[in-house]
Image (spheres, grey):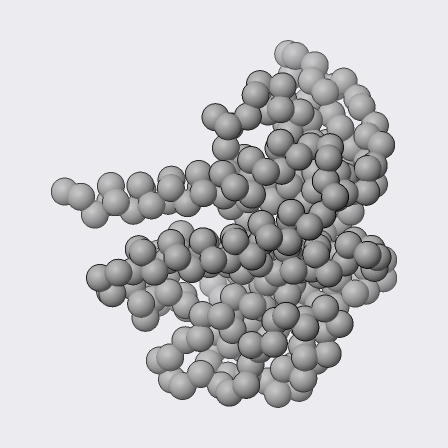
Amino acid sequence: MFGYVTINKDGLTEEEYQHFQSYYCGLCRVLKEKYQRRGQAVLSYDMTFLTVLLTSLYECENRKESIRCVPHPRKRHEVLRNEMTEYAADMNLALVYHKCLDNWADEGSKSQYMVAKLLKSRYQELQVKYPRQCGVIERELKLLTALEKGRIPEQEAEKAKDCPWSEKARNLLKTAPQKGDVDIDRVANCFGRLTAEIFVYREDEWRDALWNMGFALGKFIYLMDAYDDLEKDRKKGNFNPLLPLADREDFEEFCRQMLTMTMADCSRNFELLPLLEEIGILRNIIYSGVWTKYEQLKSRKKSVKEP
């Protein structure tokens, strides 16, 4: 579920675009240093956004470098990195480790199993370093898997209720969905809570706004992924929460409204944060970038349907 939180390049100045790319390259460089080339392979714009957001909020001092790299061997380019880059790299790896395990479980992918096996020892280090974040990632992905199979493990549901910042996400799991019936909110909330916990870097006065922002953005990512994979999941017989609704005449409008409401919650909490640095880039992503990706997906689906 990566790649949906990105920029709208047309809405940025050239200077802003290059500045964002410097953060992206910084994350790439840190991933390589910490996790070698397999770390670089999991680079995502989603985690670049988190880097920029936390850098702006906590006014971190960037370390600037001018480097050449394999993708850009001829021309030196600026790289920005700080403690938030390190954090985003660690969270990036934690998510990819579990994504590989999920792909192995769902599709029997031996290559994904091997990647997970290679990353296991590094993930175990992250469990010690970030017990809160890793604990919630594990719990919510386990709960999500159960919900996708049409059942709710009561023990896990009770643990989820104890999550310290889920006060505004109480529409969690009261009864199991009936066979053939999918509660979209319930499954999306799992990824919402997972993302929310990752957004909370420190337990301070910005904790609630970051948690609620991450919760809404995580739901948006999950729903966008479901929208993106709809036809592929239909053909393969995979779970997709949107499949029962796909034949509705108002399906596209329904999806648009659902995504719009989710991003409205995200932006409302985003505006509560005292962000000054990089505000142009951040607003571009929140108010435009995510929708650029949506419009690309919508256009692609329309072109496939047309003769």
Quadrant where the image shows the C terminus:
top left
Choose between 278 and 190: the one closer to the eye.
278
Residue 68 left/right relative to 130:
left
Q: Is residue 161 above or below residue 31?
A: below
Name the quadrant containing residue 255: bottom left
Name the residue: 62% across, 33% down: 281
Name the residue: 64% across, 49% down: 270
Residue 93 left/right relative to 8:
right
Name the residue: 65% across, 60% down: 212
Name the quadrant containing residue 155: bottom right
Instruction: Tell me where residue 224 appears, x and y as whole percent.
Output: 45, 54
Instruction: Tell me where residue 46 appears, x and y as whole percent.
Output: 60, 44
**Farthest left residue?**
307
Instruction: Tell me where residue 113 appears, x and y as whole percent.
Output: 60, 59
* Residue 235 visible in the displayed image: no
Q: Is residue 183 above or below residue 175?
A: above
Name the quadrant containing residue 138: bottom right
Instruction: Tell me where residue 291 appears, x and y as whole percent.
Output: 45, 43
Residue 299 left/right relative to 260:
left
Residue 200 left/right relative to 226:
right
* Residue 132 visible in the displayed image: yes
Choose between 115 and 193: the one closer to the eye.
193
Choose between 213 and 90: the one closer to the eye.
213
Name the residue: 44% across, 83% down: 177
